[in-house]
Amino acid sequence: MAKKGDLIIAKRLSQLTGFPEKTPFFIEFSALFEGPIHFEAHENLWKMGDKEGYLWYIHFGYGFDRILLEDGTKMLNGMTEPGIFICDENSLLWGGPAKTDSIMYTPGSAYRISYREWKNFVIINDPMRNVLLHINSHFVQMRKLRLLKMKMMDKVEYWKYIQERFSGIEKYCSQTEIARYFGVSKSTMHRIMKTA
Amino acid sequence: MKSKLIDLLHPDQRGLVRNVKLSRYVQTFIQQPGIFQYSAIDIHDCICVLVRGVIGVKHDFEGREAITHFYQEGDLFLSTEIDNVYNKQGSYWRIYEDIEMLLLPLKSDMWQQEQPLLASALNVQASLMAAFTYQKFINNLGLDRKSYSLEWLKANKRLLSLVPRMDIANYLDISKSSLKSYIKIAFNDG
């Protein structure tokens, strides 16, 4: 359980929705999270095939979740960074074992809530359910922007932008992993990095 | 619509929809090719199923137009992506062929009052699905461009006669000249 008075989750929900931090259902929801859970670099938040799923809130630290693509290769799926809620979305939506894994590349700290507790809370809590759409819309915007940047942004500029977001990313991720994240070949990625 | 909603729900929740008569809550929308007309119907918080036709989802990226995906017959999708309240990327639906779609307004009073459990479950699943769908499109960009494009062209030959080449090339994230050569390869292979 979260420590008494620990409103880290409520604070983030407030930022995402514009509701006050002390909104009762935010506080109630925040109290359902366990943590803080501390991670060392290269530790997993979850692994592919995990049957017990959690929604994680990242307080600090950087990493990636990775997905197995149809062609059998692993792709960096989404960046794990402070302020983000992450999970194996497929399992949260439809149950079953995790289809992704998530690894911290730097030391970090996170809070978590089991899928079951999360679902029970949002299904019975009208106000929380109503703001869920708002919260998820924020993540839809983030994903849209990532997709559009992958397709449309100058790759050198995009690389600089990612370096700003995750300082030292090249020390933690292989060039192959980064190339996959950018949707380009390894040689193209090498050229992009050199140009930047 | 019912089978699509069953697929959207978590296996534990699927029983909720089996005995519901959806026709009481579902609206039908028809439009000819062009830009989707917001004024024609209230699209806020709807689950949509395309009965016929083709829609492309377009966005504005720093003044340039981009297309990220298409919807075709039988696809379930969510209006959140073009909802004005959340739409920072100027996303809109471009209709390429006459469409007929079914819409289930998740926030309708009648729906929420008469089917409270199903309404709650669908609300949650739909809002999760909205973000999850975009991750799938991101992952597609991680696949080898040539083999993905060839497979997509073979599976979507019909779209070649409906959608401008420029939009298809943009969707596949390849140049127009690559598209031209991939079309040749895809349809000369027999």
Image (cartoon, coloured by chain):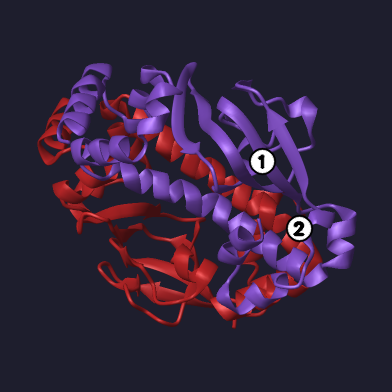
Circle 1 residue:
B101
The percent coordinates of residue B2 (x first, y second) are: 66, 61
The quadrant of the rendering that contains the N terminus of chain B is bottom right
**Residue located farthest toward the left when viewing the structure as drawn:** A187
Residue A149 vs residue A171, the one in the foreground: A149
Looking at the rendered structure, which numbered label has been put on residue A47?
none
Q: Chain A is drawn in which colour?
A: red
The residue at 30%/71% (across/down) is A40
Residue at point 58% right, 62% down? Answer: B8
Residue B161 occupies quadrant? top left
Quarter where residue A117 is shown: bottom right
Q: Quadrant of the C terminus of chain B?
A: top left
- Spot occupied by residue B142 in the image (x, y as percentages of width and height): 27, 45
Chain coloured purple: which letter?
B
Please say if the residues under marks 1 and 2 sit with CB atoms less than 8 Å apart. Answer: no
For residue A36, above or below residue A63? below
Indicate the amino acid at tag 2. Answer: Asn
Helix, strand or loop at label 2? It is: helix
In the rendered image, residue A38, in percent from the top left (x then y), is placed at 40, 74
Task: Return the residue nearer the eye: B62 or A17.
Answer: B62
Position of A52 with respect to A102 (left or right) is right
